[in-house]
Image: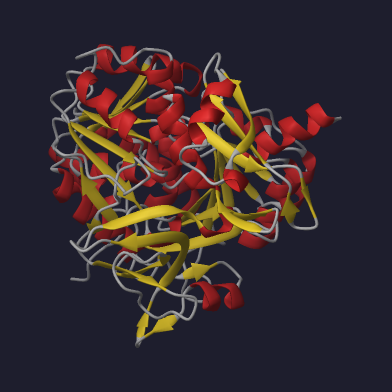
């Protein structure tokens, strides 16, 4: 019998083996595995029983998910998976023009929307989108005239869940859109086989258990959510969703829910430290802490070790194109720091993955030398949707093997441990000098004592900046002192002209510091 790589198979298995076990919890709502499976299977039946539901050119059909993080979003994702479709999350924070561009690229067969997503279904989106919209929310769907068929899940008949539709390893499990340098979003296609390899590997590596209660802090359009949802359901554990409106109460949320697994970007932990929420042993129930998505400062780790003394802390690294995370570093004593940066190393490749540091020609460089980090192995994406040339350039064949060029500057030390030095595209020209913004940020964290910081090259003209402006996540900062201390660490051309305190640092949809919004703040100030 052929293996079914459908991501919904684990939920189906646990629904039969432990039907009453909690699967997903958000505020006052919760679903057991049996309830989650039934709702997902009901959505799948609505899709697959349609006369026009058939594979195109041997490929799975695509279903857009227009939903904010919550129980209904989980049902929507699993419903698409159960039907054997490729799910395509659509961020609710995107402007309409960007969503229209995305829809034009995707060729969706249907959209599944929750209550918040349904509010965004303008006449323009309905005109260019698929002919079927399924509402999986709690409020009643308002029917609209036109060619689009709008179905309310509440009207669908109950079903007895059957095995999720068969998916081959080569089928596309999901497509997540990331920013493109040309302004056109890039659709990263991840196969069911790559996703299956990641989930099998990471659940064993982290020792996740059915008794765990895991935290969800991410929107569906951030691929960290793939880890949070599917690694939790892979082992039959419970996913507890932190509402976006209560992120600053995350410590209270962990304590009241008795969570055992924390999943987030480091910036969230840094913000909790900033508001002095990380009291000693305040997170004593945690046994596993997963940080990923950006560099992990040593100060965050030290505060976390005090707050969560019973937890293993791991720093995971990986671009969307390598199926969530592909390198890992357990935090021990002494802290595994990147030299001169005071951030955690990104460690070594997870089983089935390879990594190397190369020069501009794709040749490996010596240990201790900076270059571009490239990744190979079982988790590499199939490429970018409808962008063959971009795929060929970002996924080159080196020494007879297919690699992904991450765009990250990195180095490997003599022990084989990898260190990320920041984005190559965050290298900017300042008065003729090439500057790495992450290097400034690393020293800024140390001298300011803040975890959440961001530096930008500003103002810019003709591709070159005349200075640096830095921002610190704090209610107040002694800017003169900070700049004086940076003088002992950085050359003059890297020194920020200004250091600005922001009580609420702008973060993008992935929870990382939004440098674009920092630029806009200064542009607006300049008038």
Viewer-closest of 25 and 450 = 450
Residue 423 location (% of width, % of height)? 50, 55
Q: Is residue 109 visible?
A: no
Extreme-bottom residue of the structure: 400
Residue depicted at x 17% and y 44%: 206
Tell how many labels: 0
Q: Is residue 12 above or below residue 432?
A: above
Viewer-closest of 401 and 424 = 424
Q: How is the image coloured?
A: secondary structure
Residue 182 location (% of width, % of height)? 70, 61
Q: Quadrant of the N terminus?
A: bottom left
Extreme-right residue of the structure: 527
Residue 28 location (% of width, % of height)? 38, 14
Q: Is residue 105 above or below residue 57?
A: above
Q: Quadrant of the C terminus?
A: top right
Relative placement, left or right, of 241 versus 15 is right
Q: Is residue 111 visible?
A: yes
């Amino acid at each position: 019998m052929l293996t079914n790589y459908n991501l919904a198979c684990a939920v189906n298995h646990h629904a039969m083996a432990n039907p009453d076990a909690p699967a997903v919890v958000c505020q006052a709502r919760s679903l057991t595995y049996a309830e989650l499976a039934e709702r997902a299977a009901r959505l799948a039946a609505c899709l697959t029983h349609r006369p026009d539901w058939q594979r195109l050119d041997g490929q799975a059909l695509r279903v857009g998910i227009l939903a904010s993080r919550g129980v209904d979003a989980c049902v929507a994702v699993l419903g698409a998976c159960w039907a054997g479709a490729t799910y395509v999350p659509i961020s609710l924070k995107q402007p309409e023009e960007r969503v229209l561009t995305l829809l034009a690229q995707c060729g969706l067969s249907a959209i599944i929307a929750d209550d918040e997503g349904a509010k965004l279904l303008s006449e323009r989106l309905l005109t260019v989108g698929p002919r079927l919209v399924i509402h999986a929310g709690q409020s009643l769907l308002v029917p609209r005239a036109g060619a689009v068929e709008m179905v309310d899940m509440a009207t669908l008949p109950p079903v007895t869940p059957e095995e999720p539709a068969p998916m081959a390893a080569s089928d596309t499990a999901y497509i997540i859109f990331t920013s493109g340098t040309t302004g056109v979003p890039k659709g990263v296609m991840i196969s069911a086989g790559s996703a299956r390899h990641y989930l099998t590997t990471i659940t064993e590596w982290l020792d996740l258990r059915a008794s765990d209660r895991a935290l969800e802090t991410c929107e569906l359009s951030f691929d960290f959510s793939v880890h949070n949802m599917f690694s939790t359901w892979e082992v039959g554990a419970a996913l507890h969703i932190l509402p976006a409106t209560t992120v600053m109460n995350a410590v209270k949320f962990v304590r009241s829910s008795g969570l055992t697994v924390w999943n987030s970007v480091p910036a969230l932990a840094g913000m909790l430290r900033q508001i002095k929420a990380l009291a000693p042993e305040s997170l004593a129930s945690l046994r596993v802490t997963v940080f990923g998505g950006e560099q992990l400062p040593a100060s965050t780790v030290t505060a976390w070790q005090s707050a969560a003394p019973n937890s293993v802390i791991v720093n995971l690294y990986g671009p969307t194109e390598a199926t969530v995370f592909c390198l890992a570093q357990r935090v021990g004593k002494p802290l595994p720091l990147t030299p001169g940066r005071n951030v955690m190393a990104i460690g070594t490749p997870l089983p089935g993955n390879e990594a190397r540091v190369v020069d501009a020609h794709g040749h490996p460089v010596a240990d201790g030398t900076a270059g571009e980090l490239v990744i190979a192995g079982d988790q590499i994406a199939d490429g970018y949707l409808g962008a063959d040339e971009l795929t060929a350039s970002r996924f080159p064949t080196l020494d007879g093997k297919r690699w992904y060029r991450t765009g990250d500057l990195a180095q490997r030390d003599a022990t084989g441990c990898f260190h990320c030095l920041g984005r190559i595209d965050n290298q900017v020209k300042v008065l003729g000098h090439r500057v790495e913004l992450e290097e400034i940020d690393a020293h800024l964290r140390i001298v300011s004592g803040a975890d959440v910081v961001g530096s930008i090259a500003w103002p810019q003209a003709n591709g070159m900046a005349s200075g640096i402006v830095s921002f610190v996540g704090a209610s107040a900062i002694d800017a003169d002192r900070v700049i004086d201390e940076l003088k002992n660490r950085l050359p003059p051309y890297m020194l920020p002209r200004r250091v600005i305190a922001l009580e609420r640092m702008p973060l993008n949809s992935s929870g990382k510091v939004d440098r674009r919004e920092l630029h806009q703040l200064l542009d607006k100030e300049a008038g």
